[in-house]
């Protein structure tokens, strides 16, 4: 087999193999994708907290928690793998756990639903996790199961969740939450809960910092590492194909160059004789001869015959001659002597101008000429198919990284890993600072804290109020049976005692102090939150108002005071004015006039203060930059007036007057001090939350109050005067 034939067969083989390479590439990529889908398919429930506290702003964030949570959810969904199915569940309040979007692989379709979410009620996290776990078991199709909880993890309904059920069902819990600087308890508890299931807690950082949540390699449906490995396999095959195409194309081009060079070297020139023939009739023809010998004869009919001599001519057979080429010289050989240049000859070396006479024909030698022999055309190789394939594969190699590993994911993964490590170190420091006794004093078998012990008391709704037999209730106009009280709390409405004084009251009662609460009104002008409250037990169906609402609120206040440890509840029974909008605001002058005038109310307060002789009086503030309910301000004003009159009369048994400070307005009271009511083995905040839940008719207490107060481990008080060498904590402890 010749070399050129071998080269032709090789080129043909490579050309035929190229389509099969593309088929192999397609099968390889498709099989890789199917293998990934089959091996690591995962079901993920995105559990979104819609409790009221998600409306709050944190000092390190420039947006409400729910807005940060929505952005975090969008970030997490954008990283969902094609082989994962996702569902969206939301929770707010014990009966509001909803499947807003069932399991789907069309993950972007969930985003519009998330953008429309709004926060409402309390946080039943335990029930929400149970429902999410049940849903993922019954509806999820993935081999792996994960719940991603997006929440501030402030539990205000039911008990704190246990990881046991999730662990038993093989469900990993990751929590995306917030760093609550005012109450780190919740973050520490959330970390313990998530890590017990194999997950972790990921805080939503400041707006200018990246979000740390990422799927880890061990558990993710299609982790960055697995996607990178798949990409490397396909890119390697693409590189092999590109190399084969390049080698094949270069080989074809080399063959063409070689053939072209060979043709240039093999150029040949042909030498021919030009002979002019004049016939007897005057005709003229030019003949060119390049093949020799040539036989020219005249036949019997007188016609001239020109042909190539196939064999030697016998002398005398014909009249004519032959022309042959000998060593680049043309020689004339005559069959019979003829006139050549007028001379009879039998043989002659021809030269231009020689004339030969043949029976009436004259043949004139015009000359000898050389002409380059025309070579067959060597076409350039057709490399369009190979070029197209090369460009296509090169483009595929460039865009596949963007498909398998989205832009920035590698850098983000590296950055997130380093930041997550730093965050983990920070959380370890936090947990070290929060000792086991901070969170209940019990260490569970898996190590860490037992948050459920700290929230041992159920934070459920009242339904049927607890007995208040141990609480003395003094009706309006009734004279109390006075005793030496330690703390006298004064406020405007039922539920204010729990909102503003709850932690301090529970702490004082726990330390043996005798407590009296005075409430100016029964709250008959308040707003019943029906139908969002319980119906049943003592709570009828329908919207309560007027005296009916007042009677219910008095019962709620009594139950709350019993929970917080008060000994006496004094009802003044003064009118409660409507206040559902700014238009209904009244000046404190008008309020006090409706209560019978300043002198009358101050006189009643002085009677109570002198009768109980408390060491400390706690009330709301008078009108100040911290805007409050106008009846709160009226109570604060009248309390100050009563204490001023007491001091003027020379009575000095009251050693301090404290004004309660709304934790959301603490910045307006630079002299205010903190009283820790949650942590270091004290859980008075939870007593307060339970008392607030008792005020079922009042959303401001049982929902908003609970959701806000749970975010603070401290209560804040501003001293109007403090005539003691002891601190408040020292006084309560003696």
Image (cartoon, rainbow, N blue to C red):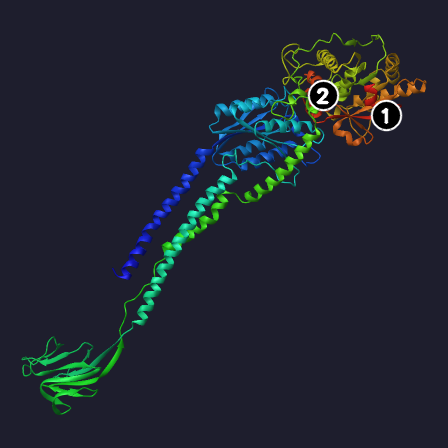
Closer to the camera in the image, 449 or 55: 449
- Report whether 509 appears left or right of 307: right
Give neighbour class at mark 1: few <14, some 14-19, many 20+ (Cα, 10 Å).
some
Looking at the image, residue 11 lies above or below residue 99: below
Residue 475, by quadrant, is: top right
Q: Secondary structure at mark 2?
A: loop
Q: Which residue is mark 1?
A: 720
Looking at the image, residue 527 lies above or below residue 313: above
Distance, label 1 to label 2, CA atoms, is 27 Å
Dot placed on the residue nearer the N-terminal end, 1 or 2: 2
Coordinates of residue 426 in the picture (x, y in percent): 67, 35
- Report whether 45 appears left or right of 311: right
Coordinates of residue 388 in the picture (x, y in percent): 39, 53
Q: Secondary structure at mark 1?
A: strand
Give neighbour class at mark 2: few <14, some 14-19, many 20+ (Cα, 10 Å).
many
Closer to the camera in the image, 677 or 356: 677
Q: Look at the image and tell me in which quarter the N terminus lies.
A: bottom left
Q: Which residue is mark 2?
A: 683
Looking at the image, residue 30 lies above or below residue 253: above
Asked whether residue 587 appears in the rendered view, the answer is no
Residue 695, by quadrant, is: top right
Coordinates of residue 47 in the picture (x, y in percent): 57, 28
Q: Look at the image and tell me in which quarter the C terminus lies.
A: top right
Marks 1 & 2, CB-CB < 8 Å contact: no
The label nearer to you, 1 versus 2, is 2
- Report whether 4 appears left or right of 500: left
Residue 54, by quadrant, is: top right
Asked whether residue 685 appears in the rendered view, the answer is yes
Coordinates of residue 731 in the picture (x, y in percent): 84, 20
Closer to the camera in the image, 220 or 69: 220
């Amino acid at each position: 087999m010749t070399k050129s034939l071998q080269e032709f067969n090789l080129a043909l083989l490579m050309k035929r193999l190229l389509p099969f390479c593309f088929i192999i590439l397609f099968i390889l990529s498709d099989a890789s994708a199917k293998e990934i889908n089959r091996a690591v398919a995962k079901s993920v429930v995105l559990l979104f907290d819609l409790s009221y506290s998600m409306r709050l702003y944190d000092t390190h964030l420039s947006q409400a928690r729910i807005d940060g949570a929505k952005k975090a959810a969008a970030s997490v969904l954008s990283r969902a793998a094609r082989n994962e199915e996702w569902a969206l569940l939301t929770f707010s309040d014990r009966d509001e756990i909803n499947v807003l979007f069932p399991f789907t692989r069309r993950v972007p379709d969930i985003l519009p639903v998330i953008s429309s979410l709004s926060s409402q009620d309390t946080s039943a996290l335990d029930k929400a996790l149970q429902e999410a776990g049940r849903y993922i078991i019954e509806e999820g199709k993935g081999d792996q199961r994960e719940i991603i909880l997006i929440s501030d993890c402030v539990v205000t309904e039911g008990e704190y969740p246990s990881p046991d059920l999730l662990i038993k069902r093989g469900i990993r819990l990751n929590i995306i939450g917030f760093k609550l600087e005012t109450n780190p308890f919740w973050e520490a508890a959330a970390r313990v809960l998530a890590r017990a299931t194999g997950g972790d807690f990921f805080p939503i950082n400041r707006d200018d910092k990246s979000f740390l949540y990422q799927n880890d390699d061990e558990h993710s449906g299609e982790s960055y590492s697995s996607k990178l490995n798949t990409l490397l396999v396909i890119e390697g095959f693409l590189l092999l194909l590109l190399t084969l195409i390049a080698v094949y194309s270069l080989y074809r081009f080399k063959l063409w160059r070689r053939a072209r060079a060979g043709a240039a070297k093999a150029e040949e020139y042909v030498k021919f004789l030009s002979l002019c023939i004049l016939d007897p009739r005057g005709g003229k023809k030019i003949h060119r001869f390049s093949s020799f010998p040539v036989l020219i004869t005249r036949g019997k009919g007188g016609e001239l015959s020109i042909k190539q001599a196939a064999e030697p001519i016998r002398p005398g057979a014909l009249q004519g001659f032959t022309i042959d080429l000998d060593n680049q010289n043309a020689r004339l050989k005559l069959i019979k002597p003829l006139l050549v240049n007028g001379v009879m000859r039998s043989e002659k070396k021809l030269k231009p101008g020689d004339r030969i006479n043949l029976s009436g024909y004259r043949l004139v030698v015009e000359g000898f000429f050389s002409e380059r022999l025309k070579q067959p055309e060597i076409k350039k190789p057709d490399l369009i198919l190979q070029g197209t394939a090369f460009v296509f594969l090169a483009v595929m190699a460039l865009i596949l990284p963007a498909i398998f590993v989205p832009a920035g994911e590698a850098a983000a993964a590296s950055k997130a890993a380093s930041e997550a490590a730093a965050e983990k170190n920070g959380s370890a420091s936090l947990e070290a600072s929060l000792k086991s006794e901070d969170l209940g004093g019990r260490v569970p078998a898996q190590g860490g804290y037992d948050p459920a012990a700290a929230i041992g008391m159920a934070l459920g709704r009242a339904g049927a109020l607890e007995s208040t037999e141990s609480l003395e209730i003094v009706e309006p106009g009734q004279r109390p049976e006075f005793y030496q009280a330690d703390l006298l709390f004064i406020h405007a409405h039922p539920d204010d005692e729990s909102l503003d004084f709850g932690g301090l009251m529970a702490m004082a009662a726990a330390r043996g102090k005798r407590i009296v609460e005075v409430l100016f009104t029964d709250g008959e002008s308040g707003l019943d939150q029906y139908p969002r409250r319980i119906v049943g037990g003592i709570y009828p169906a329908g919207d309560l108002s007027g005296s009916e609402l007042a009677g219910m609120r008095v019962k709620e206040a009594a139950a709350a005071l019993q929970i917080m440890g008060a000994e006496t509840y004094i009802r003044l029974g003064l009118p409660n004015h409507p206040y559902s909008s700014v238009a209904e605001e009244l000046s404190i002058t008008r309020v006090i006039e409706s209560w019978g005038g300043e002198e009358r109310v101050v006189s009643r307060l002085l009677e109570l203060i002198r009768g109980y002789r408390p060491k400390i009086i706690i009330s709301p503030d008078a009108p100040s930059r911290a805007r409050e309910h106008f009846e709160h301000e009226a109570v604060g004003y009248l309390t100050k007036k009563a204490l001023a009159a007491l001091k003027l009369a020379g009575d000095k048994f009251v050693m301090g007057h404290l004004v309660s400070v709304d934790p959301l307005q603490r910045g307006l009271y630079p002299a205010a001090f903190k009283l820790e009511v949650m942590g270091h083995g004290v859980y008075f905040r939870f007593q307060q939350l339970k008392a607030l839940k008792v005020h079922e008719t009042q959303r401001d207490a049982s929902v908003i109050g609970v959701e806000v107060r749970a975010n603070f481990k401290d209560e804040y008080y501003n001293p109007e005067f403090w005539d003691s060498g002891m601190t408040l904590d020292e006084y309560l402890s003696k």
